[in-house]
Image (cartoon, rainbow, N blue to C red):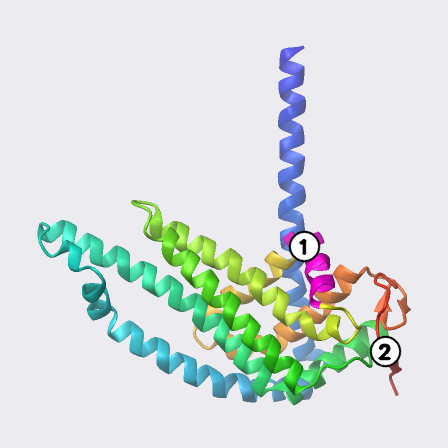
Amino acid sequence: MLPQAWSSGTDTVRALRCDVMGEVRDGARLLLRGWGYWRRRPSVMAWGLVPAALVGLLVLTALTLLVVNLGTVAQWLTPFADGWTPFWERAAEIAVQGVVLAGAVVLVVVTFTALTLTVGEPFYDRIWRAVEREETGTVPAGDTGFWRGAVDGFALMARGLLVALMAGVLGLVPVLGTVLGWSTGLVLTGWVLAHELTSRALVSRGLSRTERNRLLRAHRREAIGFGVATQLCFLVPGGAVATMPAAVAGATMLAHRVLGAGAVVNGAPGGAVSGAGSSTHAG
């Protein structure tokens, strides 16, 4: 009996692990489908490079300045190690450099996304509309204008600051701190990115922030898979600029997924959420 029970429990854990990883992979695949729009709608996607390139140049300059002065910053933050032996003093400085860099990367990714979506509102609106027409046959008529994007952008940067602080605190844990800080920052930033990038498709259907949070929490693993994949692409040199249009397209499909795939009812796939805004049929 005991071996059978142990085997059954092991199989259950293995099945749950496979299920979790499968949902994370499904989320990441949505970004790949977003990349597919470069082949299907190249001109619309290409316009999305313009704001991404402008904002990318700004944040890259800021990050470069930080990296160049990272040693000075670490020395300023570790006065407590001045009396230590050279080995431990240097170890403390390297650990602090890792923590500062992890927090900076979180802020850069989140700030880049928020500023790019705000500055590039007309360009990304065209991408979103193209994906809506192709995937659902309609374009929801809810408000997705500049000021809504600006407010969401500030909210995104505020959440990014909290994530950066959390990653920084975890980075202070002895021995494993740097790994904990980077991995936590990666996952939490992925969640924040998924939330922000799907907001256009969800807000256009009349969903409040509370309703959007509820939907994404119900599909948390897919959202994190999409967001982490997006962030990893952002970390590749030049990847943020090229990925941003694909991320907007993929996030629209993620929004369809969390709403429930199927027929379009009142602008919402599957009629998953009541109170959705009306739709404009594609011409």
Taking the spot 71% from the left edge, 57% from the top edge, the residue there is 214
Q: Is residue 27 above or below residue 111?
A: above
> Residue 63: which quarter of the image?
bottom left
Instruction: Identify the disc placed on residue 138.
Output: 2
Q: Is residue 117 left or right of residue 165?
A: right
Disc 2 to disc 1, C-alpha distance: 26 Å
Task: Assess whether residue 217 is covered by the magenta stretch.
Answer: yes
Residue 240 image offset from top left, x and y in percent: 50, 75
Q: Residue at x 34, y 65 (%)?
A: 101
Q: Is residue 83 above or below residue 254?
A: above
Q: Is residue 236 visible?
A: no
**Residue plotted at (76% across, 61% down):** 257
Q: Nearer the viewer, mark 2 or mark 1?
A: 1
Determine the residue located farthest toward the top in the rendered image.
1
Q: Which span is picked out in magenta? A: 209-221
Query: For mark 1, what is the residue?
Result: 217
Residue 268, horizontal then vertical, whole percent = 84, 68
Q: Secondary structure at mark 2?
A: strand
Looking at the picture, how far across and down is residue 72, in whole percent? 20, 70
Q: How dense is the environment of label 1, judged by Cα within 10 Å: few (below 14), some, or many (20 and up)?
A: some
